[in-house]
Image (cartoon, rainbow, N blue to C red):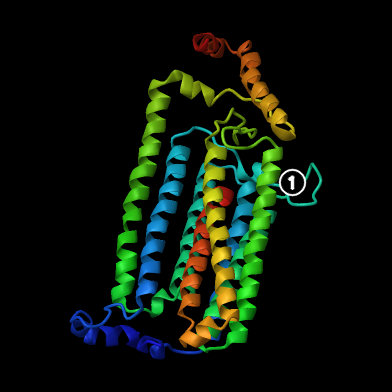
Amino acid sequence: MSNHDTHEHGDPIAEIKKVTIILSVLTIIELILGFWMIGVTSEGGRLAIKGTIVILMLAKAFYIVAYFMHLKHELKNLIMTIVVPLALFIWFITAFLSDGNSFRNLRNTYDPHFKEQATIKVEAKEAHHGEEGAKEATEAKEAAPATEAKEAAPAKAAETEKK
Amino acid sequence: MSNVTTASTKEAKWWNGGKSPFDVEYGKVMMWYFLMSDAFTFGAFLIAYGTVRFSTNGWPNPNEVFKSYPFAGEGTNAPLVFVSIMTFILIVSSVTMVLAVHAGKMMDKKGVVRNMILTIIGGIAFLSCQAWEWNHLHHEGAWWGMNPFINADGTASSTNFTNFFFTITGFHGFHVFSGVVINIIMLIMTLTNQFEKRGHYLMIEKAGLYWHFVDLVWVFVFTCFYLL
């Protein structure tokens, strides 16, 4: 085998065990946070938990790539060839998510129908079976805003506009 | 760390030609490049999902959608339970894959065979879980273009949620399926002594890279769809 393997320190099996435990613990923490988030209603609290989950996710990704995929023990030349292009994701995520956010704000400002859709409540449906059930579900969904529109005058205007 | 310093003192030599500046064989470099391109494909999918989610006012609550597990009654409310099992299945199969790669380096054919079989079982178990979940959601009326789940805030939802869910988990499931097929081929090649004849188990390492990548993608898919 190539000579860089001889530079490895320690027992590979011990390293595999260590990384397995780290990955399991990180996953369990993620799940605990996920369960905890079900009860959290404040927007800021949810955002904080989501941020923590994303950081844990990146930590898991690091351990899988570095140890399971062995990248940490490769030459720096190879590491840089793989990691540097992936840094483009930082820009992709920043640009596209803020673009999505901006699109929502623009529509909420200039598209009254879009904004109104986010205020009309519909009733939760029971689980349906098969495709016919799904069809009923969509019909019920379309019917639900219409019945509520009778109570809310601006919503009614929007309904007629749609027709 | 001594690894890095050795590399930097020899830096000029690595790029002088006559040898691979990465010090790995051709197939492995190409596997890394393929995985990088695949990472961009998955990244594009997930970023598209994120963008659409950011541009929408409401979104279904994953804890409402994914709250059942096999053999559970109609009114089961067990969010995250089934998907945690799926996640652990994939992590464990990734671990057995590392052990198979390690056994391959030691030229331990028995170890490779045992761990490859365990990895394949893990992959098939994950696929079965996913098949059950797709089937279950389909029975509830969810499919491409059909979304029976309302938004978390009680407003009407669009079909974006189900479209992205089935496309991305489907694409990932297809990767798992390909991984299982590759692993089965590797197992057959091991059993027929192909690697013994070659004198090395480098093919197992390449299949291992692919399999870990599938696990890596699931880390992201799992987080984006079930936790956030």
Q: Is residue B61 above or below residue B209?
A: above
Left or right: residue B204 versus residue A98 is right
**Quarter of the figure that contains the N terminus of chain B:** bottom left
Residue A22 lies, in percent from the top left, at: 55, 72
In the picture provided, is A16 more to the left or to the right than B81? left
Residue drawn at point x = 37 percent, y = 87 percent: A2
Mark 1 = which residue? B77
Q: How many marks?
A: 1
Q: Position of residue A67 (x, y in %)?
A: 47, 75
In the rendered image of this protein, does residue B112 appear above or below residue B62? below
What kind of residue is marked 1? Asn
Q: Residues within 10 Å of mark 1 (few under 14, many from 20)?
A: some
Residue B43 in view of the camera: yes
Position of B66 with respect to B48 (left or right) is right
| Residue B112 position within the rendered picture, expressed as x and y whole percent measured from the top left | 58, 81
Horizontal and vertical percent for residue B134? 65, 46
User: Viewed as shown, does residue B178 lie left or right of B2?
Assistant: right
Residue A20 visible in the snapshot: no
Question: What secondary structure is found at the residue carrying circle 1?
Answer: loop
**Near-viewer residue (B102 or A47):** B102
**A136 vs B92: above or below:** above
* Chain of the residue that carries numbered disc 1 in the rendered image: B
